[in-house]
Amino acid sequence: MSDRRVFLKYVIPAVLSFALSGVYSIVDGFFVGNSIGDMGLSAINVAYPIVAVIQAAGTGIGMGGAVYYSIYMAEKKEKRAREFSACALWMLILGSILLTALTFLLTTPLLRLLGAQGELLRLGEDYISVIALGAAFQVLGTGLVPFIRNHGGPFYAMISMVAGFGSNIVLDYLLVWVWNGGITGAALATVISQGVTMLIALIYLIRKKKLTVKISRSGAGSAAAAIVKIGIAPFGLSMTPNISLIIINRFSIHYGGDEAVAVYACIAYIICIIYLILQGVGDGSQPLFSRYYGEGNREKMKKMRRYAYGFAMLLALAGCVVMFAVRGSVGNMFGSSREVNQEIAKIMPVFLVSVPFVAVSRITTAYFYATEKTGMSYVLTFMEPALMLVLMLILPPLLGGQIMIWWSTVFARVLSACLALLMKQHEDQRNMPPQMF
């Protein structure tokens, strides 16, 4: 099989999965927005970062374990590879318990911190109280999928995710619209659908005899530390849109009020699809990056990276064209008011400017954490929201209020992409073989 076909074998299922994940992320907004209106949509928008932390924890642990599994398998160290699988599974279970308890205890303070108050706070509490009950499904569901992909089952990983998305759509229709469950019904649909993904992932791993819980005490500590070290970057990468969401919401409430929050809620739901597709390219490429890194085959590793950059850029540009074409009907999809819909159509092109730059950042970050360049992956992961915060503190008071909130997100992503390219170039030069004279 040619290198290009191997790349597409891993990346296409991941891209399709994450594309559907983007659709999945807007389903709650679609049903709630059309049944409750702007207030329900804003409540999910404000509360969603809590959900994202739960899911990102699973992604970080799962990806951290899966990266080392692939590296050690490539190095022919199967026993150590299986220890990392077992350690990651125990971490997912313990993490589920911890996150369930913390979410229950801290729901109201966290929602207040995110800017919820009054009716927005009440609806957010209804949503998160149900999400907390299913934290284990979400952590295990998102955490097991990277292992399926790294065990050579990218298509089955896609099936497990698609089954969850399909379940969520059907359940949202039944619980929110047919049975008038409102925001609580939407949360229940999310929890059950994640349970479907978790169940299918477990079935695959058990049938393939890839699920193991045995790990030596001497190796558990070092494995857990290594998983956390790698996992921080994919955790942060999953959280970056939500960290940005928190920052933008906080500043938008101050400069533009509830209408600005509703505008960005709709834009975030839609543009998130493109971001998730780009993450799909990175996550789909990760098993190949890690495998060739473990084998010491830098030529193939760099070839896969070139494919990833090219494919991500192609998808980014195609996504921009589609989003620009439908910008005038985005608000209608979520049942937004006429004023909100008009503002979305006006502001959407601003956000689309940054999408190709996000493609560069996503692929570079995935490459770094897949090849144990943890320090570099940390910098790229958290640089974007840090820059965004600094720019929003400086630019809106000086140059125009809410419009500069929107442009600050673009400038932060452009600067992050430039830094990613500089770091990649530095790493390539550092690993060049010495010149012979």
Image: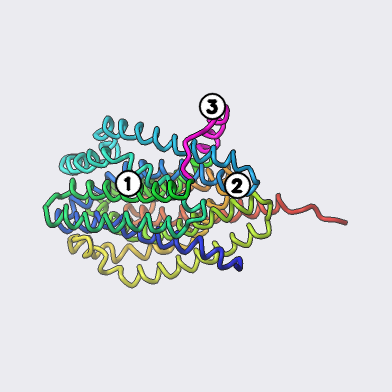
Query: Is there CB contact under 8 Å for labels 2 and 3?
Result: no
Disc 2 or 3, which lies upstream in sequence?
A: 2
- Real-space Cα distance between discs 1 and 3? 48 Å
Q: Secondary structure at mark 1?
A: helix
Q: Secondary structure at mark 3?
A: helix
Q: Which residue is mark 1?
A: 251
Characterize the local packing of mark 3: few (<14), some (14-19) or many (20 or more) Cα atoms within 10 angstroms: few
Nearest the camera: 13 or 420?
Answer: 13
Q: Which residue is mark 3?
A: 217
Q: Which residue is mark 2?
A: 73
Predominant SS along the magenta part: helix
Image quadrant in which the N terminus is located: bottom right
Nearest the camera: 406 or 189?
Answer: 189
Query: Is there CB contact under 8 Å for labels 2 and 1?
Result: no
Query: Is there CB contact under 8 Å for labels 1 and 3?
Result: no
Characterize the local packing of mark 2: few (<14), some (14-19) or many (20 or more) Cα atoms within 10 angstroms: some
Q: Residue at x 44, y 62 (%)?
A: 13
Amino acid carrying label 3: it is: Arg
Task: Give percent across and percent down for residue 68.
Answer: 56, 43
Q: Is residue 350 left or right of residue 111?
A: right
Disc 1 or 3, which lies upstream in sequence?
A: 3
Q: Residue at x 66, y 51 (%)?
A: 295
Amino acid carrying label 2: it is: Met
Disc 2 or 1, which lies upstream in sequence?
A: 2
Task: Give percent across and percent down for residue 35.
Answer: 14, 56
Query: What scheme was used to colour the molecule?
Result: rainbow
Determine which quarter of the picture holds residue 299. Answer: bottom right
